[in-house]
């Protein structure tokens, strides 16, 4: 049994190291240029159309900006973005900062959040963290010292944070819901910024009202009245917005005009151009994220009123 557990510990250690290595390997070039690279101001000179095609009613190529900048030696370099989308957030003429290496300026990094491979690297890192947490849970629940890792790091971690079967489940759950709240904050913020920066504005009209029903946790049913808004895109195709939170409490009446914003590649997902439509979701996720991080700090620090 001890031999099996020992081999299991080595296998888990190897898996964690592989995940950490792959995460670092994906981020290595971006992080190196961000820390040690020289900075330069570039400008978008072209939008590159990738051979990757999105299938749909009309085949649409994926796009990314091509940025030109000058090195400290006066050499003009063009670099293509690494992130592709249907509607790039940068347009021709937009200024973009880049980080580059003097020995290989053609491998420059655009200093835009979406240009960093945070998604793939974060996913691998998350798998590694979850694997370690499950491993710690096995040690705490079983009390079997043979489940120790080869370098004896986990027992030291358990002792340092005074982990026990009460505190650890809270830390485990927080390690899952905190990344979810961070991702929710990022996605809703990105959506708002993308819509406001790249969205096409048009006029919508309130064409009626809809009562939306929802069931609460105690089994009761609640309802609310929301305006139904109709708008047209540049081609003249009509779309409807259902359940809009713009000016609730029935202040919008049939025939009222509102400003609608939609993206060219997704015109059926238009929203009313109001502060609440764009910023309430990011504020909600951001508040939850901060609250959960504070709770995690209290749990790790052993705050007596929360953990006994």
Image: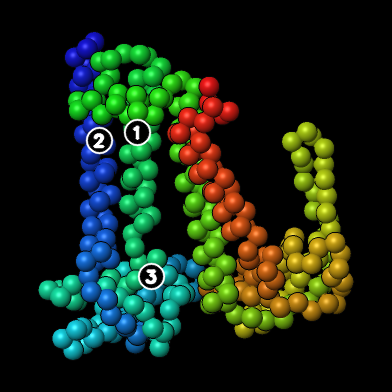
Residue at the extreme front of the image, as rendered: 304
Question: What separation in Å lies between label 2 and label 1 (alpha carbons)?
Answer: 9 Å
Of residues 60 and 122, the one nearer the viewer is 122
| Contact check, label 2 and label 1, Cβ < 8 Å | yes
Q: Secondary structure at mark 1?
A: helix
Residue at numbered disc 3: 112
Of residues 60 and 275, the one nearer the viewer is 275
For residue 157, above or below residue 206:
above
Question: What separation in Å lies between label 1 and label 3 (alpha carbons)?
Answer: 31 Å
N-term-proximal mark, 3 vs 2:
2
N-term-proximal mark, 2 vs 1:
2
Residue at numbered disc 1: 131
Residue at numbered disc 2: 15
For residue 80, above or below residue 18:
below
Q: Position of residue 31 (x, y in %)?
A: 27, 60
N-term-proximal mark, 1 vs 3:
3
Q: Residue visible at 18% across and 89% down?
A: 74
Specify whether 283 is left or right of 300. Answer: right
Q: Secondary structure at mark 2?
A: helix
Tell me the crowding category of disc 1: few under 14, some 14 to 19, or many 20 or more residues within 10 angstroms, Cα based. Answer: some
Q: Quadrant of the N terminus?
A: top left
Q: Position of residue 2 (x, y in %)?
A: 22, 12
Q: Secondary structure at mark 3?
A: loop
Q: Which color mode does the image show?
A: rainbow
Tell me the crowding category of disc 2: few under 14, some 14 to 19, or many 20 or more residues within 10 angstroms, Cα based. Answer: some
Q: Position of residue 176 (x, y in %)?
A: 47, 39
Q: Residue visible at 23% across and 86% down?
A: 70
| Residue 293 visible in the snapshot | yes
């Amino acid at each position: 049994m001890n031999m099996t557990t020992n081999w299991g510990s080595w296998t888990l250690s190897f898996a964690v190291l592989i995940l950490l290595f792959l995460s670092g390997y994906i981020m290595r070039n971006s992080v190196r240029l961000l820390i040690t690279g020289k900075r330069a101001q570039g400008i978008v000179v072209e939008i590159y159309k990738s051979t990757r095609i999105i299938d749909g009613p009309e085949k649409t190529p994926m796009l990314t900006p091509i940025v030109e900048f000058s090195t400290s030696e006066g050499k003009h370099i063009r670099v293509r973005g690494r992130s592709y989308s249907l509607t790039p957030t940068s347009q021709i003429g937009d200024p973009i900062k880049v980080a580059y290496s003097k020995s290989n300026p053609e491998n420059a990094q655009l200093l835009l959040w979406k240009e960093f491979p945070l998604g793939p690297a974060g996913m691998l890192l998350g798998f590694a963290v979850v694997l370690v947490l499950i491993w710690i849970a096995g040690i705490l629940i079983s009390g079997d010292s043979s489940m120790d890792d080869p370098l004896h790091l986990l027992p030291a971690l358990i002792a340092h944070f005074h982990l026990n079967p009460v505190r650890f489940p809270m830390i485990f759950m927080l390690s899952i819901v905190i990344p979810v709240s961070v991702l929710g904050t990022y996605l809703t913020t990105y959506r708002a910024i993308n819509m406001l920066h790249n969205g096409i504005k048009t006029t919508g009209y309130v064409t009626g009202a809809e009562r939306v029903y929802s069931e609460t946790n105690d089994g009761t049913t609640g309802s609310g009245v929301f305006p139904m808004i109709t708008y047209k895109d540049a081609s003249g195709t009509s779309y409807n917005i259902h359940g809009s939170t713009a000016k609730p409490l029935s202040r919008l009446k049939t025939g009222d005009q509102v400003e609608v914003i939609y993206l060219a590649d997704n015109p059926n997902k238009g929203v009313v151009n109001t502060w609440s439509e764009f910023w309430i979701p990011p504020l909600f996720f951001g508040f939850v994220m901060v609250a959960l991080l504070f709770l995690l700090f209290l749990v790790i620090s052993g705050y007596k009123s929360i953990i006994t």
